[in-house]
Amino acid sequence: MGISGCAAGTVKAEPTSSAKPSLTTTPPAADPTASAAAIDKVTCETYSDMLTIMHNTDYSFHHEAIGDQERTGWYDLAFRVIGRAPSGGEGPVAKALATLKGIQPPLGGDSTDPTAIAWGDASKALADACEAEGLPYWARGFVGG
């Protein structure tokens, strides 16, 4: 079933802002009243968001649906997402997140690049820490059919 017709009124667009959005990578402060387990849960969910962005980006790139510029833009977004994950406590999830945040994420396609290897190892350590705490992580594919 299709929808067609005319709008009865006029819709005005929001005025466009000339201000550029903030691209800060400073994560929000962890809620001081939240338990370490609650912060770890949010961290592992945020990690899942990053993995989802990266998975769909890689799929799209390797199936030539997007080019280098779009891939870089999506990767930048994924790295900002994990960069904003809350940090708190001294447990394995917090330590693994701190390590991952301390490594410059790789943007090139060379998996033998030492930065890519270190970042991949740190990402796996965060995945392992989430799993050890019983906090699931995932990547949801939604492109490609």
Image: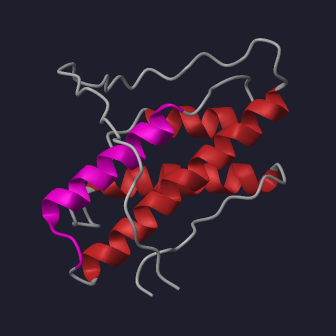
* 77 relative to 27 in the view: left or right: left
Q: Looking at the picture, tell me which residue is in the foreground, 114 or 48.
A: 48
Name above or below for residue 23 compared with residue 74: above
- Residue at the location (26% across, 26% down)? 15
The picture places residue 19, in percent across and down from the top left corner, at 21, 19
The residue located at (51%, 62%) in the rendering is 52
Residue at x 40%, y 54% (from the top left corner): 7
Which region shows up in magenta?
65-84
Q: Nearer the viewer, residue 31 or 124?
A: 31
Question: Quarter of the image containing the C terminus?
Answer: bottom left
Q: Is residue 82 magenta?
A: yes
Residue 42's spot in the image, x, y percent? 70, 38
Point 50% across, 23% down: residue: 27
Residue 59 percent coordinates (x, y): 36, 77
Q: Quadrant of residue 92?
A: top right
Does residue 30 appear in this view?
Answer: yes
Q: Is residue 141 magenta?
A: no
Residue 134 sits in quarter: bottom right
